[in-house]
Structures are given as structure tokens and as C-alpha cells.
Image: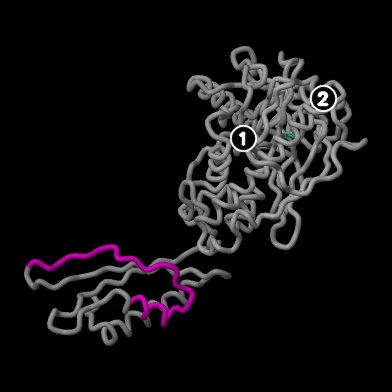
Amino acid sequence: MDQRLLQLIRRMQLLHHQMRARGMPLVGRLNVCRCRLYPPDAQTNVTRSILSRVGRGLHQQPAHPLGIMAGFIREYFGARYAYHDAISPIVSPAANFESLCFPADHPGRSRSDSYYLNRDWMLRTHTSAHQAELIRGGNDRFLLTADVYRRDEIDRTHYPVFHQVEGVCLFPQHAVEAPSTPATAASPANACDTNPRQPCYRREDSMAVEEHLKASLEGMVRHLFARAASHSVDGAAHTSSEVQMRWVDAYFPFTSPSYELEVWYNEQWMEILGCGVINHSILERAGRPDAIGWAFGIGLERLAMALFRIPDIRLFWSEDARFLGQFSPAKVTHFRPFSPYPSCTKDISFWLPPATTAPFHPNDLFELVRDMAGDLVEDVKLVDQFVHPKTGRESHCYRIMYRSMDRNVTNEEINDIQARVREHAPKRLQVELR
Ligand code: PHE
């Protein structure tokens, strides 16, 4: 094990201590005092680059697309649902798998699919890892937003760290609430042989939970699309009532029956969440044998990519102000691409024309720069301005940022453009270069 990896693991422990000090819940029975370090062993496969993502808290940032999405979901479910968003990603395999009835030979458990700190600790592969613990802690209705970790393929929509919101809602058996509005999306023939209801429940109780689940999640998706439509520039494109959804049968070891919800988006069905009626054995072991309820898990990245029109999943991790500066809390705005190539900055200073001649307008300078630079100019800003105490003349300094959208620009090329801007400025703008 290399030293820097060890250092990172230590840093993560520190993070645990800090989270605890700030009163954040540490679910998963992580005893930081006892377990001073996560000693690596033959199971260890976390990497430095993965560990460096731990604690970034993208979903906790109110002006980050992932934080905005989480905020909309929280807003939809309202105050009846307890909200958790700071639970440590380090869990035991027992929490991530066994507590959820995963069989011992499930492929998700393998080192090729999951990240292990060692044989006893891993990075959660889904937010469901905290279901049992939170239910045991007395949470009847809750949402949990968190970062999750999976070894996976590499492309524009897959990244080894992503974010999910888990939702759970329990009722006393025989007293399942009816939803305020019924579910309407097309459903498969319910609870067939391959997707059965649990025999320990009364049929009408299970059916009522399925109905509450479907109505709640359809409502959530409508809410998300409505929020996106009300703020986006071309908001009229799809209003909430136009979201087309359908339910498909699914399988999860911890729910039955299980479903996925798909949304018609960009001319195809997009799967956005998994859900189902929680296995009674989970509730029993969590001290709630009296209860029946549903759970869902929704991935935030795919939906945020669609609603904010973000073309590459890696952008969520960008610390570039040109990315982060595009978003504001509780608003869906369409991402405007920016160039990955380096910029080149040049200043130009001049005395404004005397008041007797035509007044100077910055737009004339901007137009001159566009004429000379074409699309190589990204930004022109006034950075300094003063009035000479004796002559009364006013001086402006503008900073011109040059950058190409599709290639590296050379210094000579930019010097050349800047020279032509300087050459034409006196005549076209009636200014005197300094
Ligand atoms: N945890 C599942 C996943 O990550 C989603 C899920 C959550 C399914 C809750 C059912 C109930 O794919």
C-alpha cells in the first residue's frame, strides 16, 4: 500500500471525526474510536482518485445542479419526511448487502464491482445501505441524499462516484394511506409470478402501498419537470403535464414487488429510479414487524444532465467558475458550454474623447474587438477607470480575454489581433491610446 493512499485513508478518518463533532449522524456503526485506521488487506481496492472525491458534498451545495435536484425532491416530499444528507459513505458490507438480503454470491459484492477499504469496510454502492439503520433509528418517513461509489464502464454518462436520493415511507399494516391523487402512468400486469407480492402481507395492504408508491413517485417526477420548465429559458418546451412515464417490472433483493420508472425523454425511454415494497424481513430485523412500506432510489446525475442539458458527467466535479457560476439555488438553467482551452489576456488603456466630440460607448469597443478577433474573444471587461486631476480627462482600461472554443491559440496570433485592435481604436473610437 503506498504512503499517499494511507494518508488519504487517514484524512477520511479525520472527516469522520469532524462529521461526528458537528453532530452529523454516522450510520453503519462505524466506531471511529476503536477503528483508528482501515488497515489495508487483500480486499483493498480503493484508489487515491476515488478517495479524493469523498467529502466533496456536491449534493449539499444549494447552487450545484445536484444540490438543486436534491432540493426539489426534498421540497416535493415536504416536512413529513426527515432529511439526511451527511451520512458517511464508509459502510460495512453487512450494511450494504446483507441487511438488504443480497445473496452471498451476488456479483455486486465482488472487488471488480465495488470499492473496498479492506475486508470489513467499503464505500456504499447505493443509499439503500442505510435503510435498515435509519428505520431502526425510528425514521418512519425519510429521504437520504448521498454520494455512492461503483466500479463501472467509462463514458459520458458513467462516473465511479454518483449521487442518489433514497426515500422510505412506512405505514402500520392495515392502515395504509391513500394517495391524494391516484397513479396514472401505465403499469405492467401487477405482481405476477416473477414480481410477486409478499405472502406475509394482506393483498389489499400491499396493493395500497404499491398505489401510494406509484402516485408519490409520479408526482415527484412531475414536480421535477415542472420546476425545470418554470425556470428554463425555453420553459414552454415541456410543461409538467406532458411528462410521459411508464412503470416496468424490476428485481431488487430487498423489495417485492419491485419496479422501475421510465420517462420519455429525447425520443426514448429513460430509466430514472428503482423502487418497491420493502421486504418484511428487513422491517422485522429493524424492529418494525408491525409495518409495511415502500422504498425508492433515484440517481441524480442522469436526470440533472437531462434537465440542465449538461453533456458530460465529469462536469459535475468541475471547480471551474465558468461551470459553477452558471447555476443558482432552486433554479434550472441550461448549461452553456465553455472552452477547455487556455485563455490569453491583454489589456488596452486609452483616454476617452473630450466631451465636445461624440461620447465614447463601451459597445463600440466591444464591436471593434469582435471585428478583429471573431469568435476568439471570450470576455471584455472594464478593469480600471480614473479622471486626471489636472486635465480632467477620463482614462479607461479594458481587459480582453481571448480563447478558442476548439483549439489552442498561439501568442503571435493574439499579439497580432491585439495590435490591430490598438491600430483601429483611435480612429473608430476617437480615443487616445496610452
Ligand atoms: N438501491 C437501488 C439501486 O441503487 C435502488 C432502489 C432503492 C430500489 C430502493 C428499490 C428500493 O439501484
Q: Amino acid at mark 1?
A: Ala
Q: Secondary structure at mark 1?
A: strand
Q: Are marks 1 and 2 in contact (CB under 8 Å)?
A: no
Q: Quadrant of the N terminus?
A: top right
Q: Is residue 22 magenta?
A: no
Instruction: Name the mark on residue 146.
Output: 1
Q: Amino acid at mark 2?
A: Cys
Q: Is residue 380 magenta?
A: yes
Q: Can see residue 204?
A: yes
| Extreme-right residue of the structure | 193
Magenta part of the chain: 365-389
| Extreme-left residue of the structure | 390
Which comes sooner in the sequence, label 1 or label 2?
Answer: 2
Q: Can see residue 1?
A: no
* Label 2 CB sits under 8 Å from any ligand 1 atom: no
Q: Nearer the viewer, residue 214 or 108?
A: 214
**Which residue has dot 2 on it?**
101
Left or right of 174 in this view: 399: left
Instruction: Name the mark on residue 171.
Output: none
Q: Secondary structure at mark 2?
A: loop
Residue 353 drawn at (x, y percent):
18, 80
Residue mark closest to the camera, 1 vs 2 = 2
Left or right of 166 in this view: 358: left
Q: Is residue 230 above or below residue 369?
A: above
Q: Nearer the viewer, residue 218 or 336?
A: 218
